[in-house]
Image (cartoon, coloured by chain):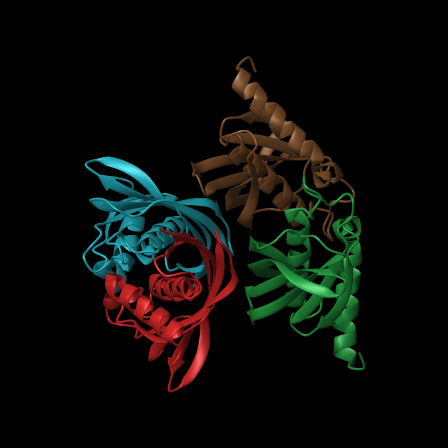
Chain colours: A red, B cyan, C brown, D green
């Protein structure tokens, strides 16, 4: 990132992400940060599963919610943070694969509310399959 | 539980719960099982937090979703399981307290879909505060 | 309503309701206004139906959304209005009956967001059946 | 539509649409039918408004829900119909313009559940603005 603003956004988001212990518990990492779009990935760790061994809905939710929240943050001024006001998830297929990849995107950034979506894909041998779709609202705070 | 059916339901749900490694990661335990209502609790572990130290949205979601799903399971015949088709969460307050308590309830049990809700409360010194509200759809499988 | 504040709230809500032409199109009327709870009812008019003659999802949605929005308004200062930021509806049964009755309730009133729910029941010969459940977010404006 | 199957789908959807009296009340028309995607438009009639003269949330919901439902129907065998199990709408901007255009799309078609989205745009002088985003679940019946 040669652009100093993008570099600052990138750093801000990675610092916030590093303070979210749940992301570490999930083994999650940020793959990319761009204005209005953030991608996060995590394996389906042995401790992140539902009763049949697939990734738990809370894993897909947590990755999608974080990717969506950070995508909102990329469009907000420094010093502002975001909180999830509400989020809806449709689960389309079992979260089985080498890793889950969550892509969060801003639909509409507003002064009081930012509307976001996220897609969560399960990747196996480089092939991706959509496993969850999220749509929600982030609120800027601070 | 003197009722043999309730005892069977209770056992079935606790066995399923024990296979969900995510629940163990969250430190979650089942507090009660009744027809159409299941209560699950978990502390806000050091590894379950967002960037300000409160419980992560994925924790509130995971507890609420599981409580709701198991409440659906209490009304289904043996051998049937449930999957979350979709779930919506409104986050009302930071998840801060000694533990989170999620109460799942069946709104309408159906052959093909069961509609559920869950309330997630944060308990501090025995006082409870509502921190999240969930509404969703469970699908019987198997 | 002997309480002058309640009387003012009641009048304010009925005036706003009267300006919503969609409510007139639906044949909707306010049944009651109380702090944090508003009840609206409407018949399933010949022009409000889906392809099998039951009430259209947009009717159940519109009644529930309005009841929920006005329940939020009862707790806000004069001069403030509310807009629906988001709303989720689960449809539980066909909207068939003499009339639909929507009860909106405030879950949590906040300065920036008010969380609401609504139940929509179909009434037939005085018997009520739950046909839809809504959960959403209202934003104060103005 | 030269393709006989597409022609049959198109006819089936237009017949169902014509039986939805709510669509006539809204002044809605089908603009296009394609496999997995249906577009519906309606003006903001004098009888479809909220208290400030913009289109009512129930109008945006009804158009989006119908477009989404019919998009699901395009992928189902003849004789099957769909019902909305649940739908979530985020309202992004007031529904003001010459007409509203709702585009429904299938995200995942399944034997038991079809996941859909819809975008509702307000068009003014040929310019379109996104005013609502929907995500939900359709259930095949019959």
Q: Is residue D25 left or right of residue C12?
A: right
Q: Look at the image and tell me in which quarter the C terminus of chain C lies.
A: top right
Q: Looking at the rendering, which quadrant does residue D92 occupy?
A: bottom right
Q: Position of residue C131 (x, y in %)?
A: 58, 43
The number of callouts visible is 0
- Is residue A80 among the parts visible in the rendering? yes
Name of the residue lying farthest toward the bottom: A125
Q: Position of residue C20 (x, y in %)?
A: 69, 38
Q: Looking at the rendering, which quadrant does residue B119 occupy?
A: top left
Q: Look at the image and tell me in which quarter the N terminus of chain C lies.
A: top right
Q: Residue at x 60, y 69 (%)?
A: D106
The one of B49 and D9 positioned closer to us in this rendering: B49
Q: Looking at the rendering, which quadrant does residue B129 occupy?
A: top left
Q: Position of residue A125 (x, y in %)?
A: 37, 87
The one of B4 and C72 positioned closer to us in this rendering: C72
Q: Residue at x 80, y 53 (%)?
A: D27
Q: Position of residue C28 (x, y in %)?
A: 69, 34
Q: Is residue B131 left or right of residue D58?
A: left
Name of the residue lying farthest toward the top: C2
- Is residue C125 among the parts visible in the rendering? no
C60 above or below B15?
above
């Amino acid at each position: 990132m040669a652009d100093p603003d993008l570099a600052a956004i990138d750093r801000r988001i990675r610092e916030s992400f590093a303070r979210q212990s749940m992301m570490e518990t999930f083994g999650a990492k940020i793959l990319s940060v761009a204005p209005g779009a953030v991608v996060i990935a995590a394996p389906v760790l042995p401790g992140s599963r539902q009763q049949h061994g697939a990734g738990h809905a809370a894993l897909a939710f947590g990755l999608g919610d974080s990717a969506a929240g950070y995508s909102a943050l990329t469009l907000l001024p420094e010093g502002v943070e975001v909180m999830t006001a509400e989020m809806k998830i449709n689960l389309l297929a079992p979260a089985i694969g080498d890793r889950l990849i969550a892509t969060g995107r801003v639909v509409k950034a507003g002064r009081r509310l930012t509307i976001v979506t996220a897609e969560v894909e399960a990747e196996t041998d480089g092939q991706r399959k959509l496993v969850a779709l999220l749509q929600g609202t982030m609120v800027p705070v601070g």
